[in-house]
Amino acid sequence: VISHPYFPTSEEDLLKILQTLSISSWEDLLPDSMKRNLLSDPLPIPSLKEWELLRWFEKRTEKNRGFEMRKVFVGGGAYPHYIPAVVGEVVRRGEFFTTYTPYQPEVSQGTLQAIFEFQSCVAELFGMDLANASMYDGATALAEAVFVALRVIGGKRVLLSPGVHPMYREVLRSYLKPHGVEIVSLPFSWDTLSLDLPQLKKFPVYGDESAMVVQSPNCFGVIEDLTELATIFPSRLLKILVCTEPLSYGILLPPGEAGFDLAVGEGQSFGVPLSFGGPHVGLFAFREEFLRKVPGRLAGMTVDKNGKRGFVLTLATREQHIRREKAVSNICTNVNLCALMVTVYLSLFGSEGLKELALYNRIQFQKITEILSSFGFVRKGAVSFHEGVFYHPEGERIRNDLKKYNFLLGFPLRKWDPSFSDHLLICATEIHDEESFQELKECLRKVV
Amino acid sequence: MDFPTHLKYTEDHEWLEEKGDRIVIGITHYAVEELGEIVYVELPSVGTRLSPHGVVATVESVKAVAEVYTPVGGEVVEVNEELKEQPHLISTDPYGEGWIAVLKVKGGLSQELLTAEQYRLYVEGLKKK
């Protein structure tokens, strides 16, 4: 154990931690499979000239196998999309290159204006009055939205759609655990893979519900009827929409217009690289009446003493550096660089461009559906956006065999629920060009 | 600084006016000066039951947020709706148009509350610190 200037844990602390856990070293926490692969000695790096050493590493890197994006037909919460070059170009500007939200308006007008534009884009996309400067990701944005409901409504129960992404549900459960709030599952139809509206109409409510949480398109890719859902419960609970694919709102009715109170979701699809699952960016939009109850930062537009337009952080009195233990949330920051990627991406497309892109994604899904149907895959569930569930008696075997041809066809739903063996969650986007579809067909001919 | 003598005061800088079984609550001139420009007041709903030291309202200024507490328990029977649109009334007239809420209480105010003179001395002590 090396004591380190940046890690405050002393050797004595570490010893106490080990004793508390009744283990002799941190390696005991690893599964055996991982322990076997630990290097017992330092990496045997040869003593070489710098350029030779670089080549030595390159050779080793070539052994890693990756998938070309155009051959990946997997979504499930993180989507393969094309990132226009202009996104990287703007984001890499030195003036923007910070993950943090700056406090000082006198030196940060560009960043603050970008945040303001981000908020405007997100609010417009979801048909809401306002949006914040972003959250860490879709799942934490959802948990914070439920906290808003608990602050505004009180209540003890949260009605949760089983169509919400399992990982999001898990995060929500962790956030709510210390608050003694009960999570109640809403009735779900396993035929249409969407909320069961007839059963929902009969679902008992007791007046102690804080929120109803619905994902659309849901974790099976199916589009829910938001207008219907917004009117189903007469009680005062807040209606929260969560989404993992906000691009769908290029063509779908925005949750704000459908009658929802808060709309949150993952913004990765809008110009943020997949990056092994993060950092991504959480979108958080809401009606104005909740302005003082929402988490995160807010940039506002104002005028300076000479009457010139300027941007500042505003309503910071909700935040922990001022309100201390009474702050609305512990999040006092955001993922600004990722939020900037989203801002550039959405500005580039505009509302018309986004609509076209969303439609194109829908058409791409139609194409992959036709291909898969011709190979005996059966499409499950109601109408989807660009992702859906497909069943084939040998679905998982086919998926495995396709890997040899560097194709990744779908996410095996067995990982979420054992009863879904040989069901694949498959997604198509603009990144899958005609050549990718043709090659996929040829490979399917070989393995099916 | 103005501390009317017909009012009672708390160390948290609320003033209270006793009117039969009701008390009117607001915040003092000193509190107003410390907070700076007041931009928002979160009021309770009529009918809310508060225990002693419960939060009656939240007053937000450009630089800080302060809770307004009631020293005695009771039920909120009236709130100053004007403050929703004109929160600055608290600053311009803290003991008049800037009142915050009326509570119906059981039993009178506690003897532990400060008189205007005691509160003045208390505030002067705070300023010296």
Image (cartoon, rainbow, N blue to C red):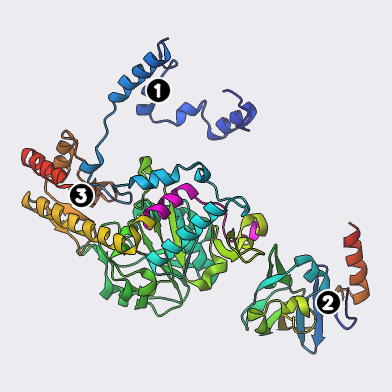
The answer to if A340 sits in the magenta stretch is: yes
Q: Which mark is residue A424?
A: 3
Quadrant of the drawing holding the N terminus of chain A: top right
Cα distance, mark 3 to mark 2? Answer: 70 Å
Rate crowding at label 1 as few (under 14), some (14 to 19) or many (20 or more) other CA atoms within 10 Å: few
Q: Chain of mark 1?
A: A
Q: Is residue A383 above or below residue A330?
A: below
CB atoms at circles 3 and 1 under 8 Å apart?
A: no
In this picture, which residue range is highlighted in magenta?
Answer: A324-346
Q: Which residue is mark 1?
A: A38
Q: Residue furthest top?
A: A47
Residue type for callout 2: Ser
Residue type for callout 1: Leu
Residue A115 position within the rendered picture, expressed as x and y whole percent measured from the top left:
50, 56
Give the residue at x 31% y 77%.
A201
Cα distance, mark 3 to mark 1? Answer: 33 Å
The answer to if B101 sits in the magenta stretch is: no
Residue A392 position within the rendered picture, expressed as x and y whole percent measured from the top left:
12, 49
Quadrant of the drawing holding the C terminus of chain A: top left
Q: Which mark is residue B110?
A: 2
Badge 3 marks a residue whose secondary structure is: strand
Residue type for callout 3: Leu
In front of the other: label 2 or label 1? 1
Rate crowding at label 3 as few (under 14), some (14 to 19) or many (20 or more) other CA atoms within 10 Å: many
Badge 2 marks a residue whose secondary structure is: loop
Q: Quadrant of residue A12?
A: top right
